[in-house]
Amino acid sequence: MREDLLQDEKVIIFQLKAEEFAIPVQQVGSIERMQSITRVPGTSDFVKGVINLRGVVTPIIDLRIRLNIEARDYSDSTRIIIVEINNMEVGLIVDSANDVIDIPKSSIEPAPEIVGAVNNDYIKGVAKLENRLLILLDLSKVLLSDELSELKELEG
Amino acid sequence: MEMSQYLDVFIDESTEHLEVLYNQVLELEKNPKDKSIIEEIFRAAHTLKGMSATMGFEDLANLTHQLENVFDEIRNEKINVDANLIDILFEAVDHLNAMVEDISNSGNGTRDVNDIVSQLIAIVSGEKHDKLNEKSSNESNLQYITNLDEFEISILNESQDRGFSNYEIYVELNEDCLLKGARVFMVFDVLEKHGEVIKSDPPVTQLEEEDFQNSFTVILVSKHSSDEISEKIKKVSEINRVSVNPFALSQYIERKHEEELVHTQSEQAATVETPSQKEEKQSKGASSKTIRVNIERLDILMNLFEELVIDRGRLEQIAADLNSHDLHETVERMSRVSSDLQSIILTMRMVPIDQVFSRFPRMIRKLARDLDKKIDIEIIGAETELDRTVIDEIGDPLVHLLRNAVDHGIEMPEERKKKGKPETGTIMLEAYHSGNHVFIEIKDDGAGIDKEKVINKALTNGVISSDDVETLTDQQVFELILESGFSTADTISDISGRGVGLDVVKNTIESLGGHITIDSEKEKGSTFSIQLPLTLSIISVLLVEVQNEKYAIPLSSIIETAIIHKDQLLSAHNNKVIDFRGKVVPLAFLDDILQVPDESVEGGSDYVSIVIVKKGDKLAGLVVDSFIGQQEVVLKSLGDYLGDTFAISGATILGDGEVALIIDSNALVK
C-alpha cells in the first residue's frame, strides 16, 4: 500500500451515488455486468450472496450498503467489480464503472475529516484531478478489519 | 550440470525407496534369515546412495553408504539381526526420510548425521573385528564385488591353479581428499606393480572420472602377500583405510547360485547372469504399466472436467428448451461420454490407502517399544482406494486413533497375562468399500472403554450434565471421549496427548463428510469405525425448492422423502414433529432456518414436502416447498470470505449457470 502511494497509480473509477471512488487496477480482476445472485443465509446484510463467475463461486458485496449509502435498485449501468485481496476474490456492486486513469502521486492527499457520507475508516486518501474529486478506497478495510471477525462470530 | 529438472524424479524415487526400506526392515525383523528381503533392502539402499551422490546430497549419500555397509554385513551373515539393530536401522532411515523431506521442501538436504553414522560404523567395525579373528580359520567371504562375468571368473580360477592368490582389496580415501582421481591412479599404479587388476567396482573409467564415493574395491591377482600389498597401498597419501582379503571364488559362485535361486527361480539356465541384467529385467516389468503424473496436473484436469460438467448441464437444459431432436441426441451422446470420462478421472485420482497405512507398522512398533508393550498390527485392505483429497486428510486422525489404541487400549503385558489374554496385543486396521463409502476400522483387543469412568470424567469436566446420564446409550457414552476436554488416561502421556486429540479426529472426519462411531466391550477391546465418502468433489444431491430458492441436499445423508398432510404435523414442546414409521422425527423448516424471503401465498397447499435426513442414528425432517430431482453436482467451496456459514457446506453451479447452496444436514440434526 505505502509503496503504491509513492508512485503514479493506475486506478479504476466507479460511482456510488454522486461520488467517484478509485481502487488500484492491480486489485481488480474483472468488471462484470449484473447477474443473478444466490442469497447466502446467515450473513451480514451487505453480503448479497454468491455468483457463478466462470465456474468459481464468488461472494458479492453491495458496496452501497457496506459504506452506509442508501440502497438503490440495480440498473443497466450497475456493475460488479471483482477484486482480489489477501487471496480472496470478492465482487463489489457499484452504480457504474467507467474509467481507468493514472493519478499522479502528488495529487493524492490524506482523507479530510469529513468526506461525504462515507466512513473515514475505509478511505486511504483523496485525489484532486482538475475538477474531479476521487476517493481512494482501502479495500482490505472494506473487506476485512474487525467487521469480518464480527461477521464470522455471528455466523459461527 | 543442471540438476533441478531431475529433482522431482529424485524426490519421488527416493520416497519410494525409503518406503521400501521401511517396509522391508520391518519384514526383516520378522524374518531375519530371509535373503530376498535383504537383497531388496540392499538394492533400495544402493540405488538411493547412487542417486543422492549424483544429485550432490553428501549427507544423504554418506548415511546411505553406511547403511548399505550394515546391510551388506547382514547379507553376509556377519551381523545378527536383533531389535537393537532394527532400532538403529529405523533411526537411520528416519534421518534419510527427514533429509529427503527437507530436499522436497526446497532445502539442501543437509543434516547432522554424524551420530547415527558413527553408530552404523560401530556396528560394522565391531563385527569386522570378529571377522578378522575368524579369518585365519575360515576363508573370508567379504565380498563387495558382486558382478563378475564368466571371463573374469575363469581368470580367477586359472590364477588359483597357477599358485597366484586372489585378493579383494577395499580402499577408502580420506573424506576431504581433493584429487580422488589422482589417488586412484596412484593406487592402481601400486597394484599393477604387484599383480593384475581383474575387476574394479566402480569400473576404472568411473574411478578416473572421480565418479564415486570415497571408496572402491578391486580384485587383484598377485603373488605377493596381503600384508605386503596393504603396506604398499598405505604409502599413497590421503588413504583412510585399506583392507586386503583373500577372495574366495568358490564362495562367490555358491552365493551367486543362491541369489539366482531366489531371483530367477524359473530360469534354469546355468549361465551366470549378472545382477545388472536382472535388475534391468525387473525394472522393465515394473515400469511399463504406469507413468508418473504430477498430482497438480490431475487437479487441473479435474477442474477442467468440473467446468465441462457444468456446461453439460447447461447444454442439457438448452436442448430441452429448444426441443430440437438433433441437438438432443448430440447432447445425450456427449453426456454418456462425459460420464465415462468422469469415472475415469475419478479413478485416476484414487490412490490406495496403503499410502497412509504403510507408515503405521513402524509407528506402532516404536510406540510399543517406548511403552514396553507388545503389540502386533494387522492391516487388511490396504489396497482400498480413496480420492487423493481424502487420503491427504485422513492420515492425522488415524495416527491419533492408533496412538490412542496403543496408549489407552492395549494393556501392559503382565496385565494381559493376568486377564488370560495373549501377552501381545493386536491392533487391526481394516479398510473396505461399501456403496459410495469407504470404511476404515481400527480394532484393538485391549481393555475396552470403561463406561463408568467415561461418565464420571464427562460429569467432572462438564461435558454432560447428571440429567443426561440416564438417557445415554452405550454408544453415546463411548462417543463422549470424542468431545473436547476429555482424556480417560489417569496420567497424561506423550503418546496420546492431553485429551485434545480425539475431538480433532471427530472434527476432521466430519469436515470430510464422514462419521465416526465407537463400539467397545469391556476387557474385549474397542472398535473405532470411520465412514468416509469416496470422493469429495462430485456428489449426488437432491435439488429442492424453498420459496424461489434452490438448495441441494447430499443424497448420502437422505433416508427418504415424504409428502405429508398438514394434519399429520404434531407439536411437542412447541416443536413441530411428525410420526415417521413409528418414530418421532423433529421437523426443521428450511424457510425459517435459511431466512428465505417470503414471496409465495401462505397456505397454498395442504401438504408439506419433507426430506428425512440422518446423522448417525438420529433423524430429522427438512421441510421444503418442492422436490426438483436428483443430480450429480460439483462441490464448490464458498471461499474464505464467507467461511463457515451455518447449515451450508458449500455451493454448486447448476445447469442454468445459477449457484445453488448445499445444505449441511448434519448441522440441522440435533
Image (cartoon, rainbow, N blue to C red):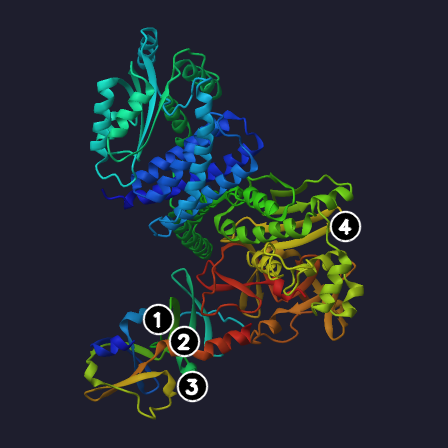
B283 or A139: nearer the viewer: B283
Q: Label 4 to label 2, Cα distance in Å?
A: 54 Å
Give the quarter of the image for residue B97: top left
Q: Chain of mark 4?
A: B
- The residue where tag 4 is placed is B522
- The residue where tag 1 is placed is A83
Image depth: mark 1 or mark 4 in front: 4
Q: Are marks 1 and 4 in contact (CB under 8 Å)?
A: no
Along the polypeptide, which appears first: circle 1 or circle 2? 1
Identify the residue at horizontal 27%, vertical 43% (top origin).
B3
Q: Are marks 3 and 4 on the same chain?
A: no
Mark 1 Cα shell of 10 Å, populated few (<14), some (14-19), many (≥20): many
- The residue where tag 2 is placed is A143
Q: Are marks 1 and 2 in contact (CB under 8 Å)?
A: yes
Please give left or right for residue B422 compared with residue A103 in the image: right
Secondary structure found at label 1: strand
Q: Looking at numbered disc 3 in the image, what kind of residue is underneath it?
A: Asn
Q: Residue furthest top?
A: B161
Please give left or right for residue A143 compared with residue B595 in the image: left
A82 to B368, vertically: above or below: below
- The residue where tag 3 is placed is A68
